[in-house]
Image: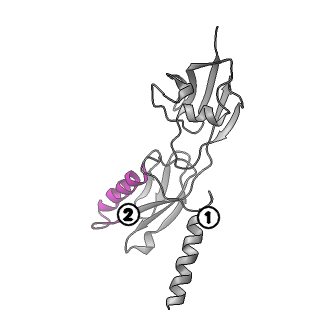
């Protein structure tokens, strides 16, 4: 038995050191917002018939046993768990313990255009938050001709697109005046500097 436990701990340690790939379940950080095409598992403690693994639809909803369609898109894992728990409390279960786990993140991309060294599309990594300065860094940094103090972000909203001007102060040194989180689908454009 001791040999078995030692081998088991060794294998777990090797897996932890090697890390999980993007296909494997990942621990969701508190600030990650669930999005369309993420695959989630919903578990209700001591209710195995209610366990569901599903993909979040384009409108941010999932379909669950007993309670039907629940919109969890745009919520954190904790917020989604609370929302589902509240729905089960309304006439179905007494004191349900609900856990939402992200099984696989959907691929998300943003683009950086204009006066950067490597314009193009870049993947927004899993649960990590990325600001505009970090996005420009992924695109090779500002080109010599770039206006480093002002960046335009084109973002999709419910009715189309909106343009957001992000003011960066001392961006070359990494100090942003405004904290601005990049979202999937954002198009970041760095304008040319006028001498």
Q: Dot 1 corresponds to which residue?
A: 18
Is residue 95 rendered to the left or right of residue 189? left
Give the residue at x 59% y 35%: 135
| Relative depth, front residue between 157 and 187 | 187
Of discs 1 and 2, which sits in the foreground?
Answer: 1
Residue 161 appears in the figure: no
Apparent side of residue 80 relative to residue 19 in the rendered image (left or right):
left
Tell me the residue at 68%/17% (across/down): 145
Residue at the spot x=49%, y=50% of the render? 61
The image quadrant that residue 132 belongs to is top right
Q: Callout 1 environment at 10 Å: few (<14), some (14 to 19), or many (20+)?
A: few
Residue on which the image places disc 2: 98
Outermost residue on the front side: it is 173
Helix, strand or loop for disc 1: helix
| x and y percentages locating residue 142 in the rendered image | 65, 26
Q: How many marks?
A: 2
Residue 154 is one of the magenta-drawn residues: no
Point 48% across, 27% down: residue: 176
Give the colour scheme shown. Answer: one colour
**Which segment is the magenta one?**
76-98
Is residue 38 something one can see in this rendering?
Answer: yes
Up/down of 121 relative to 69, above or below? above
Residue 152 in the image: state x and y as whole percent: 57, 22
């Amino acid at each position: 038995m001791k040999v078995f436990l030692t081998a088991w701990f060794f294998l777990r340690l090797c897996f932890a050191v090697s890390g999980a790939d993007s296909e494997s379940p990942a621990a969701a950080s508190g600030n990650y917002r669930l999005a369309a095409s993420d695959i989630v598992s919903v578990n209700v403690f001591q209710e195995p018939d209610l366990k569901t693994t599903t993909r979040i639809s384009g409108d941010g909803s999932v379909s669950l046993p007993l309670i039907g369609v629940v919109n969890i898109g745009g919520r954190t894992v904790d917020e989604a768990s609370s929302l589902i728990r509240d729905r089960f409390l309304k006439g179905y279960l007494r004191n349900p313990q609900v856990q939402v786990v992200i099984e696989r993140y959907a691929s998300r991309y943003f683009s950086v255009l204009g006066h950067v060294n490597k314009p193009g599309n870049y993947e927004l990594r899993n649960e990590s938050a990325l600001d505009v300065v970090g996005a420009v860094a992924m695109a090779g940094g500002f080109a010599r001709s770039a206006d480093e103090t002002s960046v335009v972000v084109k973002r999709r909203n419910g009715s189309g697109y909106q343009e957001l001007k992000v003011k960066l102060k001392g961006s070359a040194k990494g100090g942003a005046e405004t904290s601005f989180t990049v979202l999937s689908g954002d198009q970041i454009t760095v304008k040319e500097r006028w001498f």
